[in-house]
């Protein structure tokens, strides 16, 4: 049987040899039309993303004092620009954020591959840098955790395509929407490596850290950056002690601030920092907190250096210790005593919290440790003979009865429960009997 192909007809014979014509309509799929439709949709989306990116870039060019960026929850397009700019605040409606980010991401990755394969001329690089900046701005504002994009910005800064001051402003803008962005903080530290310490606005940098920590609890990256400022900036100790106490009162459960406070106190003692004697707040004696702490342990004295040193360092030859070191010792112990009282007040007001107990212990450990260091003639920073910070060999040889402060501390702290006594045995070597 021979079948002749036909466009719409198939010939078929039955068992008696007759033939029937069966017409079968075969649908034709217009793949070209569907492909064109998808291509048009992609082009429309790309054009829309480009327009939004241009609008955002126009805001950057227009407003040199942008302070914050937010993604505004909105599910549908209302046939108007999704870019919102109000009083130095920039916003982008959420319905387009993912599309805009994907477009910027593809563009930047494509650029990355091209520049890896070949080097462009200087003029082309300048033109491309201006174009890249607007894509980088959008991509990093929406998702600042892409390290590759920060590296591209670093390359542009090194080629003088981007201004350091504007980059500092941009990274602060990123931190306004993502306060925990480690990449943004690291980028700021990298930018400051090109500037001298005298040219840096350290109080402004502290303010950026505080706003980031204020917006996001337990912000490790913000407090780590603040420690970097403390190590590299000028003397900010007095203002930092005031600011951190306010922060502790406001964010009662954010232990990151309590830990920074401990680092701050150690830094103050390391630098022999102390305020003038007439700097007591609201007319109170400058060493009032330390006097009150001693009174809580049953040790009465006046709030003056001579009486306090007699209780804290009864067997130390004070003439062998510099006057500034003794002033710093008393000042830092007074701050630690103030923190101990603050923790007690916070616990009475808000109830028991781990951060109150942990910080009170750290403050107590600071006072006891440095009393013993001066008693033993150990300079600050020198490791004790056993493990670092281990006071056991020294406290084990001390006659507590001859040291009024240490004896009173050992006696009073034992009444705070078995868990606290175990901590005292471990960190202060008080030798309490096992419960």
Image (tube, rainbow, N blue to C red):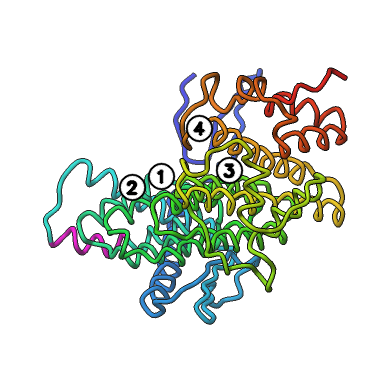
Residue 144 visible at all: no
Crowding around mark 4 (Cα neighbors within 10 Å: few <14, some 14 to 19, many 20+) is few
SS of the residue at dot 3? loop
Residue hosting label 2: 151
Numbered disc in front, either 4 or 2: 4
Whether 255 is drawn above or below 1: the answer is: below
Residue 115's x, y, as percent? Answer: 22, 46
Residue hosting label 1: 147
Residue name at image x 13 percent, y 62 percent:
123
Residues at marks 1 and 2 touching, judged by CB atoms closer than 8 Å: yes
User: Which segment did they paint magenta?
Assistant: 123-132
Residue hosting label 4: 377
- Ranked by sequence position, the earlier of labels 1 and 3 is 3
In this orientation, which residue lies closer to the viewer: 405 or 124? 405
What is the CA distance from the residue labelled 3 to the residue labelled 2? 60 Å
Residue hosting label 3: 25
- Is 257 on the left or on the right of 176, as rendered? right
- Ranked by sequence position, the earlier of labels 4 and 2 is 2
In this orientation, which residue lies closer to the viewer: 260 or 51? 260
Residue 129 among those drawn in magenta: yes
């Amino acid at each position: 049987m021979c079948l002749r192909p036909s466009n719409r007809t198939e010939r078929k014979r039955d068992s008696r040899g007759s033939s029937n014509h069966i017409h079968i309509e075969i649908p034709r799929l217009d793949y070209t039309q569907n492909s064109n439709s998808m291509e048009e949709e992609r082009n429309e989306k790309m054009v829309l993303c480009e327009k939004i990116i241009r609008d955002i870039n126009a805001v950057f060019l227009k407003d040199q004092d942008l302070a914050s960026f937010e993604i505004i929850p909105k599910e549908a397009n209302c046939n108007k620009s999704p870019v919102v700019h109000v009083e130095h605040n920039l916003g982008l409606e959420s319905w387009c954020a993912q599309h805009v980010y994907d477009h910027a991401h593809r563009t930047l990755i494509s650029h990355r591959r091209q520049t890896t394969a070949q080097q462009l001329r200087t003029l082309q690089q300048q033109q491309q840098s201006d174009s890249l900046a607007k894509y980088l701005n959008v991509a990093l504002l929406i998702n600042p955790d892409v390290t590759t994009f920060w590296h591209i910005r670093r390359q542009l800064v090194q080629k003088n395509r981007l201004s350091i001051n504007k980059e500092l402003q941009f990274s602060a803008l990123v931190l306004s929407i993502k306060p925990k962005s480690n990449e943004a903080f690291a980028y700021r530290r990298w930018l400051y490596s090109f500037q001298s310490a005298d040219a840096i606005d350290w109080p402004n940098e502290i303010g950026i850290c505080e706003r980031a920590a204020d917006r996001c609890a337990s912000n490790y990256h913000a407090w780590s950056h603040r420690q970097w400022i403390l190590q590299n900036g000028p003397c900010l100790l007095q203002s930092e002690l005031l600011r951190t106490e306010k922060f502790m009162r406001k964010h009662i459960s954010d232990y990151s601030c309590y830990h920074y406070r401990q680092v701050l106190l150690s830094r103050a003692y390391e630098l022999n920092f102390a305020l003038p004697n007439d700097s007591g707040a609201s007319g109170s004696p400058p060493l009032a907190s330390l006097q009150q702490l001693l009174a809580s342990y049953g040790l009465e004295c006046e709030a003056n250096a001579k009486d306090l040193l007699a209780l804290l360092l009864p067997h130390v030859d004070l003439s062998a210790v510099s006057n500034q070191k003794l002033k710093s010792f008393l000042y830092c112990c007074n701050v630690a005593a103030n923190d101990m009282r603050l923790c007690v007040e916070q616990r009475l007001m808000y109830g028991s919290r781990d951060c109150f107990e942990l910080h009170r212990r750290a403050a107590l450990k600071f006072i006891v440790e440095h009393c013993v260091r001066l008693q033993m003639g150990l300079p600050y920073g020198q490791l004790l003979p056993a493990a670092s910070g281990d006071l056991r060999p020294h406290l084990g040889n001390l006659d507590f009865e001859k040291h009024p402060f240490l004896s009173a501390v050992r006696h009073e702290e034992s009444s705070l429960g078995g868990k606290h006594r175990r901590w005292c045995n471990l960190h202060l070597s008080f030798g309490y009997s096992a419960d």
